[in-house]
Amino acid sequence: HGGALVAASEVTLAAGDILRAEYSPARRCASVAVERCDGTLLEHAFELPLPANGEEYVLGATLPDDCVLQMVDDMLLLTVHGGTCDGDDSAVAVACTTLGGREVFAGRLVADATIAELRCAVQAAWQAAGETPACMVLLTPDGARLTEESDARTLRDSLSRA
């Protein structure tokens, strides 16, 4: 308390926005962000431990009375990595990793398979392993969300842009 204001930004929240807070003691860093399907609206990363000069990092929001917040405590964020298979342009080697780098899905799919088909394959693999996260979010390596609006796009198109 009594800390100096380092930066202030205003973002108008909308339905479906994601408020993301990450803490990585191993990397000695943390970050807060507000994300929407078309990209990151606000992000702040900082090193740990917090500075001794009294600075504070606060993510706050003023919400209307009729706002409904949904807490998803079982969200699986996966980064989708892909590339051609041994020079074969008709197939894509796909790997999905957690933000911590753990590979949770790996497979070979036809390049014309859609994001929806990839999403189903990843969910099937998780269910076969006996795990069912409440929410799964697919991300490209540059951090863009692969939303339901992108489900009709092919892996070839989606992963070549990343």
Image (spheres, rainbow, N blue to C red):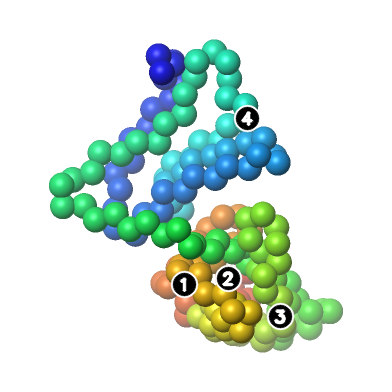
The reply to whether callout 4 and callout 1 are in contact (CB within 8 Å) is no
The residue sitting at the left extreme is 65
Residue at which label 3 appears = 107
For badge 4, the amino acid type reads Leu
SS label for mark 3: strand
Left or right: residue 135 versus residue 81 is left
> For the residues carrying marks 4 and 1, which lies nearer the camera in this image?
4
The residue sitting at the right extreme is 86
For badge 1, the amino acid type reads Ser
Q: Along the line of sight, which residue is nearer the eye, 91 or 23?
A: 23
For badge 2, the amino acid type reads Ser
Give the x, y percent position of residue 31: 54, 39
The reply to whether callout 3 and callout 4 are in contact (CB within 8 Å) is no
Give the x, y percent position of residue 46: 58, 32
Give the x, y percent position of residue 50: 58, 25
The residue sitting at the front extreme is 130
Distance, label 3 to label 1, CA atoms, is 20 Å
Position of the C terminus by quadrant: bottom right
Where residue 155 sits, quadrant-wise, is bottom right
> Callout 2: 10 Å neighbours few (<14), some, many (20+)?
some
Q: Earlier in the sequence, mark 4 or mark 1?
A: 4
Left or right: residue 160 versus residue 59 is right
> For the residues carrying marks 2 and 3, which lies nearer the camera in this image?
3
> For the residues carrying marks 3 and 1, which lies nearer the camera in this image?
3
Distance, label 4 to label 1, CA atoms, is 36 Å
Residue 105 to residue 57: above or below: below
Residue at which label 4 appears = 48
Residue at which label 1 appears = 150
Give the x, y percent position of residue 24: 63, 42
Residue at which label 2 appears = 158
SS label for mark 4: loop
Left or right: residue 65 versus residue 5 is left
